[in-house]
Image (cartoon, rainbow, N blue to C red):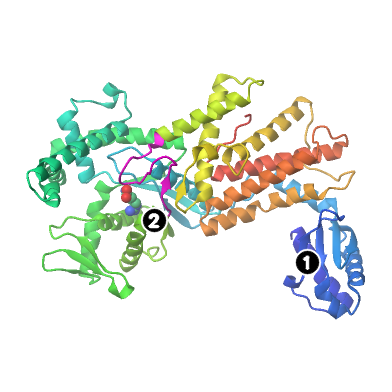
Amino acid sequence: MTIEEKLIAGVQAAVKALYGMEATAQQVQLQKTREEFEGHLTVVVFPFVKAARKAPDMVGNEIGQYLVEHVGDVVAKFNVVKGFLNLVISDAPWIALLNQINADPKFGFQPVTDQSPLVMIEYSSPNTNKPLHLGHVRNNLLGSALARIVEANGNKVVKTNIVNDRGIHICKSMLAWLKWGNGETPESSGKKGDHLIGDYYVAFDKHYREEIKELVAQGMDEEKAKQEAPLIKEAHEMLVKWEQGDPEVRSLWKKMNEWVYAGFDETYKMMGVSFDKIYYESDTYLEGKEKVMEGLEKGFFYRREDGSVWADLTAEGLDEKLLLRSDGTSVYMTQDIGTAKLRFQDFPIDKMIYVVGNEQNYHFQVLSILLDKLGFKWGKDLVHFSYGMVELPNGKMKSREGTVVDADDLMAAMIADAYEASKERVKQTEMPEEEAREVARKVGLGALKYFILKVERKNMLFNPEESIDFNGNTGPFIQYTYARIASILRKANEQGVVIPKELSTLNSQLSTKETELIQKLNQFPAAVRQAGTDYSPSGICNYCYELTKAFNQFYHDFTILGETDETLKFFRLSLAQAVAKVIRLGMGLLGIEMPERM
Ligand code: ARG
């Protein structure tokens, strides 16, 4: 039982014994005691006045007396002010609570067992024709944070990715490379493979647009020109060859995709994200066709005269959805059905979460219905973790068009900013260059991650400057507080102070600021649980921010190492240690690393 639960039960027993009143737990209102009074928690006595038929202060005194006599391990003493019963909580339960928090290295986390449900989380899911951009950064950060939170709630988690590695987009890059590449490779050019391929994709587009312009100038209708341009025709021919398994096209495709994957791997590594199992569209799209044919036989889908296969979802309030084109080729939806089939063959999925932008809301609404029809037990309740667009202050950034902010460039810029900022700050305490770089990496990425995760699903503007501000609701603010605690603990260690593993009783009374901090720590498990049920990394951001603020308030009001009462010094060190641990665990769920110095 928590301290609050014990108190509520105590008050219920008191009014029953004193006034014969059956009070519900809701009738017992507990509040934080106001600063000007002595006490930690306050009981509002007015709900019991009628049953008692006594003046409020009298009622307060009687209940207070009862609590001291019956729950004396919790209530040390009390005072009554105008119908408010202020309770001073004994030190023992606080100390016990802090000891409990300190004893558990995975405080707040639910263990994963063989019986735990299996949750598969898909995120990232790039196309292999260009490098990752800011939109992917947001996707990856949300997905990997979600994976950690779901796991911390006692689920087996499989992190997955579907790579869209085939299709017209990659043929465009391949064709451009054949035409204008002169055999350029990542080695020969010194470019990351994904950037190299991205450059050819851009080159294709440039030449393609020129061709269209020319055709239009010759009097062709623009739509027609888009189809008739020689480059796009050639790209389509290449795709057909790919489908037919043409060895030359396939080997070029393989080579170029390998370059891209090597590039993605570097980006993922820097971002701190990983996957347990990666699927490739080139493997899954044929499986989708099979599954659709199965659905056709079972009568879930129907065939039109031109041979195309459709799902009629009008009964579900949606429209009709194409699943196979008349030439038998598959569409995006078919691929997702195939991927679902392979995934379910590989893992006993209980719950599936897709982290994909909100421009695909309709797609996943339809997919859920189709998977359900096709007998996937998790299809109906699949979660589409949908989120909005992310932009930078200068210039728009959208996933499919326009100028894109490159993920590698963005991370490098954040780290460089953090490096500069720390150089200005830490003039006196010189840090070895290697450590300074490592701290800058943690802080720059911490700023980026925290800012994005805090906003969560809404459309957002990523403001690099604001994200790295040391005073505010930012990653670096929390990291800085962590580093400050780490430095206190280092100093204690240097002074030969050994913090006891288990604290015993104190010589003096704890203040509300201290007990509030313990209470804040004790809310961490609930915050993790809530973030798990809501699929909400931002809940963890808020918790970490609140805890950090509470610690800074405490640190402002009290000395730690300078405290002369040894029991109190141990207590405060131990409290600081617990705060550092919980910050590390919480921020760890967000994929944010903590620097020991800053
Ligand atoms: N690669 C796709 C795109 O860029 C996103 C894939 C999302 N995942 C899925 N299972 N459909 O739009």
Q: Is residue 461 visible?
A: yes
For the magenta stretch, what is the residue range?
387-408
Label 1 environment density (alpha carbons within 10 Å; few <14, some 14–19, many ≥20): many
Closest to the observer, 224 or 4: 224
| Residue topped by disc 1 | 8
Residue that appears at 12% across and 47% down: 225
Report the residue marked by disc 2. 358
The N terminus: image quadrant: bottom right
Residue 175 in percent (x, y) is at: 17, 36
Res. 403 image quadrant: top left
Vertical placement of residue 131 versus 81, above or below: above
Q: CA distance from mark 1 to mark 2?
A: 45 Å
Cβ of mark 1 under 8 Å from ligand 1: the answer is no
Residue 86 is inside the magenta segment:
no
Q: Can residue 501 be seen in the rendering of this structure? A: no
Q: At x 52% / y 54%, what residue is drawn?
A: 536
Q: Kindly identify the amino acid type of the residue bearing the numbered disc 1.
A: Ile
